[in-house]
Image (cartoon, helix red, strand yellow):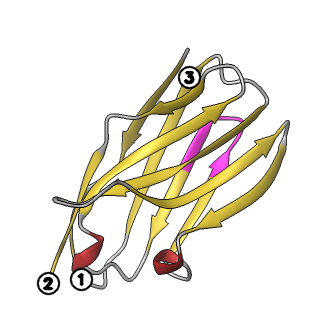
Amino acid sequence: QVQLVESGGGLVQAGGSLRLSCAASGSIGSINTMGWYRQAPGNERELVATIRTIGSSIGRTIYADSMKGRFTISRDNAKNTVYLQMNSLKPEDTAVYYCWMRTPRWGETWGQGTQVTVSS
């Protein structure tokens, strides 16, 4: 199985920055995709960004259009950790951010979520 533990959420003013981290443990394997989704109250969960790993190589990254240019996803394969650097935050970025992972063996795994609140 795979376990995901997120950290780094909090309260920030509009225009500010936050960095989320998600550490994966368990039977991760060498080919997997990690990423972030978010869910605001009353809304469906939506994609933020994903990043793929094949062995030691970093593969394709995907961003939701509204996050391009403001958010950057990265990962440290040695630490099995994915990061989300969020800049120029807006009040509409307020949501619970969930770490996500997909592996061939275990399918999809979700973290417990971390709250990000952006005040105007």
86 drawn magenta? no
Question: Mark 2 belongs to which amino acid?
Answer: Ser
**Can you say whether 98 is above or below 85 in the image?**
above
Of mark 3 and mark 2, the one earlier in the sequence is 3
Percent coordinates x, y for residue 38 in the rendering: 36, 56
Relative placement, left or right, of 104 versus 49 is: right
Report which residue position mark 1 lands on.
14
Of mark 1 and mark 3, the one earlier in the sequence is 1
Q: Are marks 2 and 1 in contact (CB under 8 Å)?
A: yes
Please tell me whether mark 1 sits on a helix, a strand or a loop: loop
Report which residue position mark 2 lands on.
120
Please tell me whether mark 2 sits on a helix, a strand or a loop: loop
Binning the other alpha carbons within 10 Å of mark 1 as few (below 14), some (14 to 19) or many (20 upward) gives some
The residue range painted magenta reads 75-82
Percent coordinates x, y for residue 61 in the rendering: 69, 61
Question: Residue at coordinates 58% horizontally, 61% vertically from top-left?
Answer: 73
Report which residue position mark 3 lands on.
25
